[in-house]
Image (spheres, rainbow, N blue to C red):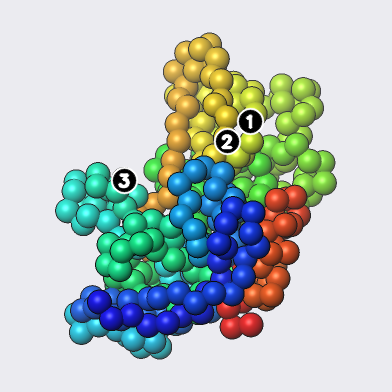
């Protein structure tokens, strides 16, 4: 297959810094689009992959799965996009396309395994896929989103991961008017969950360990903010229909499960490295559920983008130049960001 050269930013080893490198992209196939990448978000998953924290990283690696750009070429079979359109790519760039989950629009549960935009086996060129820390990307149009014209395009990049990661469970558990929802943690995921749950019409309470984030939770739209380290404040909490837990460190989930109403659910979207202990009485008392959720499929991600456009929702970001990528990762390790970094690939 013919290829084109593309400038990218990646790492050659687990402890190596991110640097400029050249990669190959395929020339467009019949149903492909080529996108000039304008912005790409930085996610904790990118950091874990760079450091091989979860195992399986193939080097060199080019991370990035929150991609916003402009279509520069389209294949002859492409009808939903044209040159000049704004477009976006999230985590998924391929799947089997024919299993029950793909047919239902849940490509994230593909029985044969969906293809991650970076560091996954490349079904076309061999080797692995390269992500959004790059000047361009080529992908099948079926996995490309149409990006609405937001006022702040850079701030939409985190919607492609953080946005859909919280939108999908909030929708699945039917959050809306009359529902009482708790959000555990105010970070990249949590701050998006507050905005989206509030736009859905729910009463939103935020649980945080940081006194400094109480006022910020209310600025983001929360009706109430609770210091989870304060036993008296926690004792006063009850009656939640759903709690969305965004924390990726080991923590006591029973403290939150115990605030659920009968048939309420705690849904985990954070990814702690260690197992979490569930007390039997926490779930048996009240027929409560402890569940988890992944990202959403392509159709649901498009729906999320349209919802966020309608409600004027974007991420709170700090825009970085390409020369600041390593600085961004260093600060991310220290949780020194409110609340997401986005790289300006035009820089």
Measure how far apart labels 2 and 1 are at the Cα level. Answer: 6 Å
- Residue in the picture at 66% in, 67% down: 325
Q: Which of marks 3 and 1 is nearer the N terminus?
A: 3
In the picture, residue 254 is in which quadrant?
A: top right
Left or right position of 20 against 92: right
According to the image, label 3 marks what residue? Answer: 109
Provide the secondary structure element on which disc 2 rests. loop
The answer to whether the residue labelled 3 contacts the one labelled 2, judged by CB atoms less than 8 Å apart, is no
According to the image, label 2 marks what residue? Answer: 272
Q: Earlier in the sequence, mark 3 or mark 2?
A: 3
Residue 144, position as x, y percentages in the image: 35, 69
Residue furthest to the right in view is 212
The answer to whether the residue labelled 3 contacts the one labelled 1, judged by CB atoms less than 8 Å apart, is no
According to the image, label 1 marks what residue? Answer: 250
Q: Height in image: 141 above or below 280?
A: below
Res. 301 visible in picture: no
Number of other residues with Cα within 10 Å of mark 1, as a class: few under 14, some 14 to 19, many 20 or more: some
- Residue in the picture at 37% in, 83% down: 4
Q: Which of marks 2 and 1 is nearer the N terminus?
A: 1
Residue 253, position as x, y percentages in the image: 60, 26
- Residue in the picture at 46% in, 55% down: 58
The answer to whether the residue labelled 2 contacts the one labelled 1, judged by CB atoms less than 8 Å apart, is yes
Measure how far apart labels 3 and 1 are at the Cα level. Answer: 26 Å
């Amino acid at each position: 297959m013919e290829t084109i050269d593309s400038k990218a930013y990646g790492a050659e080893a687990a402890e190596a810094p991110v640097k400029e490198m050249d990669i190959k992209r395929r020339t467009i196939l019949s149903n492909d689009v080529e996108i000039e990448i304008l912005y790409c978000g930085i996610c904790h998953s990118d950091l874990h992959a760079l450091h091989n924290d979860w195992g399986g990283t193939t080097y060199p690696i080019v991370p990035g799965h929150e991609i916003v750009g402009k279509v520069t070429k389209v294949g002859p079979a492409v009808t939903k996009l044209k040159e000049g359109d704004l477009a976006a790519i999230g985590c998924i760039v391929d799947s089997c396309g024919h299993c029950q989950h793909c047919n239902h629009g849940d490509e994230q549960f593909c029985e044969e395994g969906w293809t991650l935009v970076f560091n996954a086996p490349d079904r076309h060129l061999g080797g692995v896929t390269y992500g959004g820390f790059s000047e361009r990307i080529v992908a099948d149009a079926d996995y490309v989103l149409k990006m609405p014209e937001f006022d702040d395009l850079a701030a939409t990049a985190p919607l492609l991961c953080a946005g859909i990661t919280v939108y999908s469970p909030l929708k699945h558990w039917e959050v809306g008017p009359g529902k009482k929802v708790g959000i555990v943690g105010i970070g990249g995921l949590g701050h998006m969950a507050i905005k989206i749950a509030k736009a859905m019409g729910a009463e939103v309470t935020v649980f945080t360990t940081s006194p400094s984030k109480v006022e910020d939770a209310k600025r983001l739209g929360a009706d109430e903010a609770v210091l989870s380290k304060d036993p008296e404040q926690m004792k006063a909490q009850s009656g939640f229909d759903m709690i969305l837990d965004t924390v990726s460190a080991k923590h006591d989930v029973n403290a939150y499960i115990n605030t659920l109403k009968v048939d309420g659910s705690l849904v985990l979207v954070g990814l702690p490295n260690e197992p979490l202990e569930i007390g039997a009485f926490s779930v048996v008392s009240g027929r409560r559920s402890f569940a988890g959720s992944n990202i959403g499929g392509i159709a649901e991600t498009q729906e999320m983008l349209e919802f966020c456009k309608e409600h004027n929702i974007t991420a709170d970001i700090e825009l970085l130049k390409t020369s600041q990528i390593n600085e961004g990762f260093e600060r991310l390790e220290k949780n020194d960001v409110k609340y997401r970094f986005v790289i300006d690939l035009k820089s």
